[in-house]
Each structure stands twice: as C-alpha cells, then as structure tokens.
Image (cartoon, grey):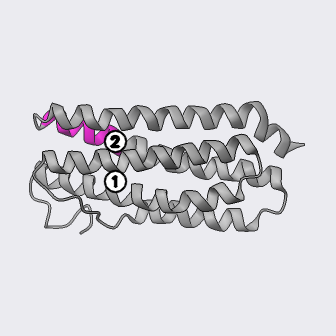
C-alpha cells in the first residue's frame, strides 16, 4: 500500500501506515548495519555502528509496543525510500577504494538514514498527539531523541576526524 492509495481513508489509517513504514525501515536498517560495521575502517565509527545496531533493536521493540497500544500487530509496509537509501549506500561503498574516503561515505549514508528516521518519527509524534495518543507520542519520542543523538555523534566524528582524513 503506497502513501497515496485509496486504502488510506482516515488519519488513523495514515498513522498506521507510516508506523508500518518505519517498522519496515528499522528492520532493514538493523539488517544493513552489520555490513556497515564490517566496512568501517575507523574503530570509533565501527563502534558507533555496533552501538546503533543494539539501539535499533530497542527501537524495533519500542515500535512493537506502540503497535500494541493501537491494538495492532507489529507489521511492516514496504518502504521504497529506505530501500533506495540503503541501495545507494551499498553502491557508493562498493566503489570507494580509499579507506578514509570509505569511512566518510559510510557516515554520509548513515546520516541519510538518520535524517529519514528523524522525519518519520517527528511526523508520527505530531500525529499521535493530534489523535490524542500522547502515550504513543511519548514512546516514539524516546526513539526520536536517540536518532538525533546518533546523527550528532556521526557529524562530530566526521567533522573532527574522518572527513579531514578523507580530504588529505
């Protein structure tokens, strides 16, 4: 079911669909992280990816809880956006020979993922509040703050070390 299909008739339908979208995305991200961990040559970057993989497991569990709050079973809906972001990351990483440049490319790919997640969670939180589901909004806000923190960590790593090495 696409975002603009006839199956979405109400705000509740739209909310559920985007929940399914991010649930699918989190699972795809969780599956893609081991490859990013293996490709990272900077130990600090590899450790950040490992930590984020564990965090992603908790985020998937948190989403499952949010589905239960809605009286729904956790279920993903195909997300072409995250599929495209991951595909592009794999293509770029496969083309980079210089290990320092590869680390910079991995950070850029990871941040594209983080920014996608930040937009989705921000939207879901706003909608949950509008729908009177502050319980779900609070649950999702924990994940949103984690995603923002991960993005900031990646930016700091890139700006202080990795991008400098890649450029020299």
The quarter in which the C terminus is drawn is: top right
Q: Earlier in the sequence, mark 2 or mark 1?
A: 1
Identify the residue position indicated by label 2 in the image: 121
Identify the residue position indicated by label 1 in the image: 22
Within-10-Å neighbours for mark 2: few <14, some 14–19, many 20+ = many
Residue 29 in the magenta stretch? The answer is: no
Left or right: where does residue 48 sit relative to residue 14? right
Q: How many marks?
A: 2
Q: Secondary structure at mark 2?
A: helix
Of 40 and 167, nearer the camera is 40
Within-10-Å neighbours for mark 1: few <14, some 14–19, many 20+ = many
Q: Position of residue 14 (x, y in %)?
A: 18, 53
Task: Tell me the CA gap for discs 2 and 1.
Answer: 8 Å
Q: Are marks 2 and 1 in contact (CB under 8 Å)?
A: yes
Q: Residue at x 51, y 32 (%)?
A: 149
Residue 125 in the magenta stretch? The answer is: yes
Q: Position of residue 153 (x, y in %)?
A: 60, 33
Q: Which residues are magenta?
A: 120-130
Q: Residue at x 42, y 46 (%)?
A: 117
Left or right: where does residue 137 sit relative to residue 27? left
Q: Residue at x 70, y 52 (%)?
A: 105
Q: Position of residue 146 (x, y in %)?
A: 44, 35
Q: Residue at x 41, y 31 (%)?
A: 145
The quarter in which the N terminus is drawn is: bottom left
- Judged by its main secondary structure, the magenta piece is helix
């Amino acid at each position: 079911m696409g975002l603009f299909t006839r199956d979405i008739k109400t705000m509740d339908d739209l909310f559920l669909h985007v929940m399914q979208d991010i649930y699918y995305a989190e699972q795809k991200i969780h599956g893609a992280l081991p490859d990013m961990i293996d490709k990272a040559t900077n130990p600090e970057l590899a450790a950040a990816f490992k930590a984020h993989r564990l965090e992603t497991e908790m985020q998937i569990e948190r989403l499952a809880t949010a589905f239960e709050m809605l009286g729904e079973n956790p279920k993903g809906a195909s997300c072409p956006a995250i599929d495209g972001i991951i595909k592009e990351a794999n293509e770029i990483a496969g083309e980079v020979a210089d290990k320092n440049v590869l680390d910079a490319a991995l950070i850029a790919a990871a941040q594209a993922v983080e920014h996608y997640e930040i937009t989705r969670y921000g939207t879901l939180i706003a909608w949950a509040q509008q729908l009177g589901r502050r319980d779900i909004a609070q649950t999702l806000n924990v994940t949103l703050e984690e995603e923002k923190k991960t993005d900031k960590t990646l930016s700091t790593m890139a700006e202080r070390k990795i991008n400098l090495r890649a450029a020299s």
